[in-house]
Image (cartoon, rainbow, N blue to C red):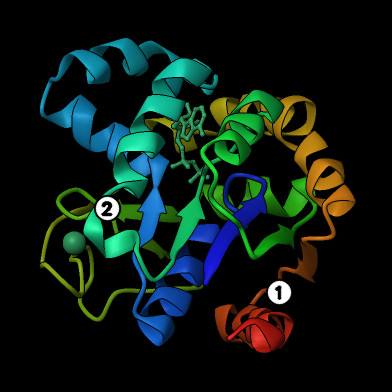
Amino acid sequence: MKLILLGAPGAGKGTQAEIICQKNHIPTISTGNILREALKSGTEMGLKAKTFMESGQLVPDEILIGIIKDRLQEDDCKNGFILDGFPRTIPQAEALDGMGIKIDAVLDIEVPDEEIVARMSGRRVCESCGASYHVLYKQPKEDGKCDSCAGALVQRKDDHPDTVKERLAVYHTQTEPLKEYYSKQGKLLVVHGQDAVEATTKLVLEALEDLT
Ligand code: ADP
Ligand code: ZN
């Protein structure tokens, strides 16, 4: 299964991606995580991306297209993959189409802006592996510690309320047009994000039923 996850920042793409990827044994490719890794290890790409990311802006298309082109050529992508956070602009989607990869479906998780702002303040991520948690909706087994790697859970700089508003504005102007783009290709599946993660997962798995 070759799947794209679409939705506003904080709509729960990453959480659903993890679940789908475990069920189907295909990798999740999170461009946000790849960029944060690059930033942490101080690579040239990381340095270039830093200011865009911290202010809630998108990193330039050519950087992202390069990342994805390389990543999708790796062996583990042969049987499928889930893209979490790519494409985020029309030029990125066109570049992906140009790579000759046939995407099966684009799953759009819809969550109203007000809810996003409220949710994001409670989001925490693992400093070491990037797994995400929430102080109300997805608590770790042990306070402040990642379930899978015991790394420290921290708030991302770009999860502060002002940056979240900027990221939402960027989402609406630059990413949302992808809904029409993929709807025209007959690939768009829409799911409404619920408060409980499991409730959203149920809808997601129903929407993907015919694909697996
Ligand atoms: P979220 O968890 O809010 O969906 P991500 O972790 O996917 O956000 O991405 C964090 C930041 O990384 C974005 O705000 C943006 O600056 C950058 N980024 C990630 N993916 C892309 C992309 N496809 N195009 C441009 N910038 C990106
Ligand atoms: Zn971890």
Examine the image and state in which quarter residue 190 appears: bottom right
Residue located 44% across and 78% down the image: 19
Q: Which mark is residue 22?
A: none
Beta carbon of the mark 1 residue lies under 8 A of ligand 1: no
Residue located 87% across and 43% down the image: 180
Left-right relation of 181 to 19: right
Mark 1: secondary structure: loop
Q: Position of residue 166 (x, y in %)?
A: 64, 24
Q: Is residue 173 above or below residue 126?
A: above
Q: Position of residue 124 (x, y in %)?
A: 36, 54
Residue located 37% across and 26% down the image: 66
How many marks on residues?
A: 2
Which amino acid type is shown beneath numbered disc 1?
Gln
Q: Which residue is mark 1?
A: 194
Q: Position of residue 171 (x, y in %)?
A: 69, 33
Left-right relation of 135 to 177: left
Which amino acid type is shown beneath numbered disc 2?
Gly
Task: Please name whichever residue, 93 or 102, is drawn nearer the observer in this view of the structure.
Answer: 102
- Residue 183 shows in the view: yes
Q: Is residue 22 above or below residue 71?
A: below
Q: Residues within 10 Å of mark 2 (few under 14, many from 20)?
A: many
Mark 2: secondary structure: loop
- Residue 136 shows in the view: no
Beta carbon of the mark 2 residue lies under 8 A of ligand 2: yes
Q: Residues within 10 Å of mark 1 (few under 14, many from 20)?
A: some
Left-right relation of 63 to 35: right
Q: Is residue 120 above or below residue 208?
A: above
Task: Please name whichever residue, 107 or 125, is drawn nearer the observer in this view of the structure.
Answer: 107
Q: Which residue is mark 2?
A: 130
Residue located 71% across and 83% down the image: 203
Task: Please name whichever residue, 69 or 207, is drawn nearer the observer in this view of the structure.
Answer: 69
Label 2 or label 1, whichever lies nearer to me, is 2
